Image (cartoon, helix red, strand yellow):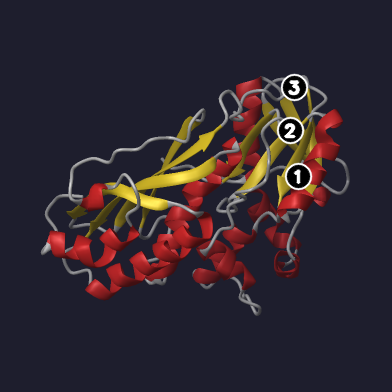
């Protein structure tokens, strides 16, 4: 890690060197040296988070660190990969207190222990703007076993893990637009649950995580496979807290993003295997629709069986 934060190397030594693992060269070099496990392929993914866009400026720094790591682990989970290590860039204003870095690093350390991953290196810089964070996660998988967005075929079924909509509703809670008596929704927004450990390889014909909204991300799979997907809004799994928000929030649940659940396309003969894998991993899965021939796109049917009209499909970065 190298750049222009005040007392940069002291900051690295205090907060980030304890996170370093094998191959990181004690964070005293400009690169890491990584040897993948024998006979395995590497899987790499990167995501960025910016204060005021992906997290709120007053969010606890330990949860910011954990969310940064987890949104990337969610992408590894969608490929069926096992976490190995990560690179990270931290850009923060010079006025950022040392306590913020301490909390941020403590959150990362907690999740490193939980997910068996270590820091390999990265960069630290100062910025006149808000805190900007970027993380590249590296995983490994058996050769040729990574699951892609492509592969959905007519007759396949659409499945999701967990519950949908909690992240988007949690953001509404954080902005004072929605009550959250149990604290469930805000917790889900601040701390996603990456579905590492669910064996999707050899089961799903296509898979990705739900980060920008269920409808929008399913649309990505449909475009990649040149198929149409139909989902039944009544089948989309909602938490008790999301149901308590009322039917007026259903469209937000379907399009709001920040769920970091897995969206799986599964041929019917493999559905039993999916249920077994989900049971073994302790992760709930729900079938919500099917894939058919047709122009790439997603049809969401309401309780009356008619297509729902949604103002937007999901989050757009630009």
The image shows residue 133 at horizontal and vertical percentages of 33, 53
In which quarter of the view is residue 308 placed?
top right
- Mark number displayed over residue 153: 3
Q: Which residue is mark 2?
A: 203
Q: Which residue is mark 1?
A: 277
- Give the number of the mark in front: 2 or 3: 2
The image shows residue 190 at horizontal and vertical percentages of 51, 64
Q: Is residue 265 above or below residue 72?
A: above
Real-space CA distance between mark 2 and mark 3, rounded to the nearest whole angstrom:
14 Å
Q: Which quadrant, please, contains the C terminus?
A: top left
As drawn, is 46 to the left or to the right of 172?
A: left
Cβ atoms under marks 1 and 2 closer than 8 Å? yes
Crowding around mark 1 (Cα neighbors within 10 Å: few <14, some 14 to 19, many 20+) is some
The image shows residue 211 at horizontal and vertical percentages of 55, 47
Earlier in the chain: of badge 2 and badge 3, it is 3
- In this orientation, which residue lies closer to the viewer: 232 or 309? 232
Q: Residue furthest bottom?
A: 181
Please name the residue shown 11% across and 54% down the image: 4
Q: Is residue 186 above or below residue 307?
A: below
Please name the residue shown 52% across and 55% down the image: 115
């Amino acid at each position: 890690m190298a750049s222009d934060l005040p007392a940069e190397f002291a900051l690295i030594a205090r907060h980030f060197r304890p996170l370093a693992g094998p191959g990181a060269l004690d964070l005293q070099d400009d690169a890491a040296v990584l040897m993948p496990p024998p006979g395995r392929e590497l899987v790499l993914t990167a995501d960025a988070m910016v204060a005021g866009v992906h997290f709120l400026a007053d969010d606890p720094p330990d949860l910011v660190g954990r969310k940064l790591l987890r949104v990337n682990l969610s992408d590894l989970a969608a490929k069926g990969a096992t976490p190995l290590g990560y690179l990270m860039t931290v850009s923060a204003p010079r006025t950022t207190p040392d306590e913020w870095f301490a909390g941020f690093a403590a959150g990362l350390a907690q999740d490193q222990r939980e997910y068996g991953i270590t820091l390999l290196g990265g960069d630290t810089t100062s910025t006149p703007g808000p805190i900007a964070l970027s993380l590249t996660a590296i995983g490994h998988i058996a050769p040729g076993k990574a699951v892609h967005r492509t592969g959905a075929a007519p007759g396949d079924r659409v499945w999701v893990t967990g519950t949908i909509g909690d992240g988007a509703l949690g953001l509404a809670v954080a902005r004072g637009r929605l009550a959250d008596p149990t604290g469930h929704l805000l917790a889900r927004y601040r701390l996603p649950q990456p579905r590492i450990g669910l064996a999707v390889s050899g089961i799903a014909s296509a898979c990705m995580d739900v980060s920008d909204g269920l409808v929008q991300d399913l649309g990505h799979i449909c475009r990649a496979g040149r198929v149409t997907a139909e989902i039944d809004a009544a089948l989309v799994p909602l938490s008790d807290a999301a149901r308590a928000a009322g039917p007026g929030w259903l469209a937000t649940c379907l399009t709001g993003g920040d769920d970091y659940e897995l969206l799986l396309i599964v041929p019917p003969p493999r559905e039993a295997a999916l249920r077994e894998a989900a049971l073994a991993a302790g992760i709930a899965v729900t079938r919500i629709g099917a894939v058919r021939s047709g122009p790439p796109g997603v049809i969401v049917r309401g309780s009356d069986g008619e297509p729902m009209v949604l103002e937007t499909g999901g989050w757009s970065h630009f």
